[in-house]
Image (tube, rainbow, N blue to C red):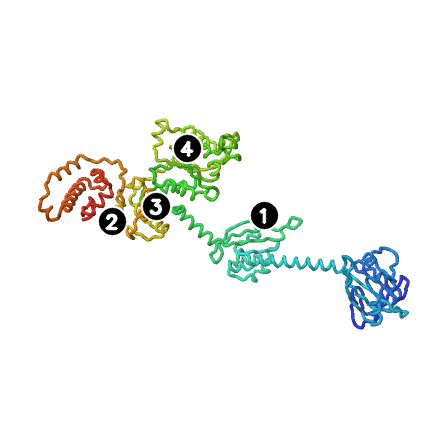
């Protein structure tokens, strides 16, 4: 230990050409000049106490000990660690850091030593260096630092690196392309998906100016500059050079001054989505679930054209037609082709199937305690469930008069009250009504409100019965045959004669009757092929006039003619009966031509009349010879 005008100076032991001695003791070329804060020699280094204390700012513990282990200097950091903020540290207290054995080892070997010491929450890394002062007195320079903050910092850095790696993996593996530019339009980063969308490797874009890429035709008008201009997200759809439709959304990143410093752009290929959307749009025109709207006849083409025309509007539609013609299918098709399909539900209410005393609560819902047996929490009605969607009121002609008033209010005011409620409820639902009754006649009879009639009769669409669109019968049969074959895992077919009989049938029950008949034929017939004899006696539901008197006279004339006995003897009674039956049928077909009218006149089913005509080879009027 030596002294100069400013205080004690430490001379470190000669360590040869080593430039760094532990932490805080540095060797370098020296300039011997008394009075300097630090003195260096070629074989060692002199550190002034003021220089050592500068190390304290680095949270390093620095101490100087003589050869007996007494502390001649200790900075504030090491004092804090040892629990003595002031006063002179004694040898015994310092043995926690530098045991006597290590002191002896260092002094005897003349070599520096490193070791770790744990003091409570401190994990100290100790570096001890032997030294001699100018009096050649041996001692030890001890430098220590707490590794806990460093270890915590390393752990945080490791966590940050793991998060950064994870984010980069997400960035690179995103199905959408992500493109990042700075405030000058220079590309900073992009991911692998950009190559899939553009066919150009991502490395090509890095460092490129978007203006350069636009000029080269690599990208179209960049959304990034528009984002910088508007300082808000911007979305556009562009078609790139590969013919792909790309949905591009650029979002700004701001600094603390509110300036745009980055633009992050997301690019998504919507080519396939557009194709599927177009395909779905086409399917919606004709299908709902499994039941199609068969469009073959001119009359149904006109119905579909009108239905599709009004689908995109919110106007009220009134569907007219006999029972079973497919009013609900058309109503669902209108809903599926409207803007309400994505926002709300299609709710169906059969006004004729719900008892009148329950219909009001079903339509408008009820509040808690509205009546005996009501749910404690109340119940929303069909109008509420159809909010933003479509409410289909089937059999509207069956609605009681007192509910017609409430329905009229909903149509006019777009609001209603629950049963037992006092608060009006706003609703936005499209109304499609349907009936098989003559509402105009009901109005004149006082059975239906005239004001409600005109509210519903905005766009009337009349669906013709199946007997008036016979072109649709065979396609419908084919559809339901395929449907029920798949349902019952069978592979049955209808013969040509069977199809002819079914096509000529009047179908008073319309499509519902046809579907039920096809299902029944597939279920009850064990044979693979369904022939005319498998058909049941089809009911006659039409009211067309038939001249029964003329038929009866024709039959009487036939029965008046005696059958020759030799015919009975040759062919037997059965042959004579069949011959007589053939003549009666031939006469009836000659007079009426229609299997329906023949069946009506002879009081048999239409299917029987057709089947026997084929049996006896009787040609109908209009058939080619």
* Residue 40 in sight in this render: no
Q: Is residue 114 above or below residue 378?
A: below
Residue shown at the point (77%, 57%) measured from the top left: 120
Check if mark 3's residue and mark 2's residue have beta carbons within 8 Å. no
Q: Is residue 625 above or below residue 376?
A: below
- Residue 52: % across, % down: 83, 62
The CA span between labels 4 and 2 is: 45 Å
Identify the residue under disc 3. 294
- Residue 184: % across, % down: 61, 55
Identify the residue under disc 1. 232
- Residue 623: % across, % down: 20, 46
Q: Nearer the viewer, mark 2 or mark 1?
A: 2
Q: Nearer the viewer, mark 4 or mark 1?
A: 4
Q: Is residue 230 above or below residue 57?
A: above
The CA span between labels 1 and 3 is: 50 Å
Q: Earlier in the sequence, mark 4 or mark 2?
A: 4
Check if mark 4's residue and mark 3's residue have beta carbons within 8 Å. no
How packed mark 1 is, by other alpha carbons closer than 10 Å (few <14, some 14-19, many 20 or more), is some
Q: Earlier in the sequence, mark 2 or mark 1?
A: 1
Check if mark 2's residue and mark 1's residue have beta carbons within 8 Å. no
The CA span between labels 4 and 3 is: 33 Å
Question: In this rendering, would 345 be left or right of 443?
Answer: right
Identify the residue under disc 2. 497
Circle 1 SS class: loop
Identify the residue under disc 4. 355
């Amino acid at each position: 230990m030596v002294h100069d005008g400013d205080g004690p100076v430490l001379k470190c032991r000669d360590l040869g050409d080593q430039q760094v001695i532990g932490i805080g003791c540095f060797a370098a070329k020296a300039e011997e000049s008394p009075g300097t804060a630090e003195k260096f020699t070629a074989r060692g280094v002199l550190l002034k106490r003021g220089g050592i204390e500068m190390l304290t700012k680095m949270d390093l513990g620095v101490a100087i000990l003589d050869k007996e282990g007494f502390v001649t200097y200790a900075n504030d950091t090491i004092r804090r660690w040892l629990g003595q903020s002031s006063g002179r540290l004694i040898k015994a207290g310092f043995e926690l850091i530098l045991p006597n054995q290590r002191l002896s080892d260092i002094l005897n070997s003349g070599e520096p030593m490193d070791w770790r010491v744990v003091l409570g929450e401190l994990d100290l890394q100790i570096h001890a260096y032997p030294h001699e002062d100018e009096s050649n007195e041996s001692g030890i320079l001890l430098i220590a630092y707490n590794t806990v903050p460093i270890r915590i910092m390393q752990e945080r850095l490791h966590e940050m690196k793991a998060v950064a790696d994870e984010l980069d993996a997400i960035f690179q593996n995103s199905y959408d392309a992500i493109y990042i530019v700075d405030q000058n339009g220079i590309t900073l980063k992009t991911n692998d998906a950009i190559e899939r969308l553009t066919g150009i490797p991502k490395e090509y874009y890095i460092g490129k100016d978007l203006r350069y890429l636009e000029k080269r035709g690599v990208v179209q008008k960049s959304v990034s500059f528009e984002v910088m201009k508007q300082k808000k997200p911007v979305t556009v759809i562009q078609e790139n050079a590969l013919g792909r439709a790309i949905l591009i959304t650029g979002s700004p990143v701001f600094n603390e001054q509110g300036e745009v410093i980055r633009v992050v752009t997301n690019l998504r290929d919507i080519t396939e989505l557009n194709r599927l959307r177009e395909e779905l749009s086409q399917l919606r025109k004709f299908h709902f679930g499994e039941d199609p709207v068969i469009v073959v006849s001119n009359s149904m083409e006109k119905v579909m054209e009108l239905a599709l025309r009004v689908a995109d509007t919110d106007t009220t539609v009134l569907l007219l037609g006999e029972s079973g013609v497919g009013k609900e299918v058309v109503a669902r098709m209108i809903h599926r082709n409207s803007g309400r399909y994505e926002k709300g539900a299609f709710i169906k209410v059969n006004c004729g199937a719900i008892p009148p005393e329950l219909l009001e609560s079903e339509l408008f819902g009820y509040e808690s305690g509205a009546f005996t047996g009501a749910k404690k929490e109340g119940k929303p009605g069909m109008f509420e469930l159809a909010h933003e969607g479509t409410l289909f009121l089937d059999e509207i002609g069956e609605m009681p008069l007192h509910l017609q008033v409430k329905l009229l209010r909903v149509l006019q005011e777009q609001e209603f009250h629950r049963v037992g409620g006092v608060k009006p409820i706003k609703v936005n639902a499209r109304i499609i009504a349907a009936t098989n009754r003559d509402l105009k006649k009901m109005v004149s009879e006082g059975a239906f409100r005239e004001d409600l009639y005109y509210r519903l009769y905005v766009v009337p669409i009349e669906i013709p019965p199946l007997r008036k669109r016979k072109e649709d019968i065979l396609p419908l049969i084919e559809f339901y045959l395929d449907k029920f074959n798949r349902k019952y895992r069978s592979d049955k077919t209808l013969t040509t004669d069977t199809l002819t009989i079914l096509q000529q049938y009047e179908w008073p029950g319309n499509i519902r009757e046809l579907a039920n008949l096809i299902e029944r034929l597939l279920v009850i017939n064990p044979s693979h092929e369904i022939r005319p004899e498998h058909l049941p006696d089809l009911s006659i539901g039409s009211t067309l006039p038939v001249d029964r008197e003329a038929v009866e006279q024709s039959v009487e004339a036939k029965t008046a003619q005696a059958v020759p006995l030799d015919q009975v003897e040759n062919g037997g009674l059965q042959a004579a009966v069949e011959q007589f039956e053939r003549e009666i049928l031939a006469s009836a077909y000659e007079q009426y031509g229609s299997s329906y009218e023949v069946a009506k006149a002879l009081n048999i089913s239409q299917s029987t009349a057709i089947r026997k005509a084929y049996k006896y080879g009787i040609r109908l009027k209009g058939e080619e010879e």
